[in-house]
Image (cartoon, rainbow, N blue to C red):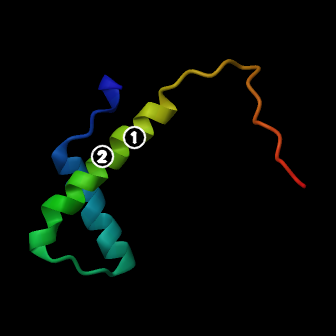
Amino acid sequence: MADRDITDEALAALLDGGLAVQALPLEEALRPRVLMHLKTAVAMAALVTDFPLPDEAEPAPVYRP
């Protein structure tokens, strides 16, 4: 996970880009909280993507009543 550490500047650029694409406003007072949650989401995603799966791993069957 160390090589996936994202700088605060990169997260800010991601936030700014997403806001621009969606044409969404963001109050400046809320920006630090949004960046905090974005950083948490990136850390949670890294936990999932860094988990090694063997080649023979298959998805669980879908339950259909």
Categorize mark 1 by other alpha carbons within 10 Å: few (<14), some (14-19), many (20+). Answer: few
| Residue 49 location (% of width, % of height) | 50, 33
The dot on residue 61 is none
Q: Is residue 45 above or below residue 37?
A: above
Q: Nearer the viewer, residue 9 or 32?
A: 32
| Residue 52 location (% of width, % of height) | 56, 21
**The quarter of the displayed image where residue 16 is located:** bottom left
Q: Is residue 12 above or below residue 61?
A: below
Q: Quadrant of the N terminus?
A: top left
| Residue 42 location (% of width, % of height) | 35, 44
Q: Quadrant of the C terminus?
A: bottom right
Q: CA distance from mark 2 to mark 1?
A: 6 Å
Secondary structure beneath dot 2 equals: helix
Q: Is residue 24 above or below residue 63?
A: below
| CB atoms of marks 2 and 1 within 8 Å | yes
Q: Nearer the viewer, residue 29 or 8?
A: 29
Left or right, 48 with respect to 26, comes to: right
Q: Name the residue located 20 percent from the left edge and 41 percent from the top edge.
A: 7
Q: How many marks?
A: 2
Q: Amino acid at mark 1?
A: Met
Q: Name the residue located 21 percent from the left edge and 52 percent from the top edge.
A: 36
Q: Which residue is mark 2?
A: 40
Q: Nearer the viewer, residue 64 or 22?
A: 64
Q: Which residue is mark 1?
A: 44
Categorize mark 2 by other alpha carbons within 10 Å: few (<14), some (14-19), many (20+). Answer: few
Q: Name the residue located 27 percent from the left edge and 54 percent from the top edge.
A: 37
Left or right, 24 with respect to 33, comes to: right
| Residue 57 location (% of width, % of height) | 73, 24
Of all residues, the one furthest to the front in this rendering is 65
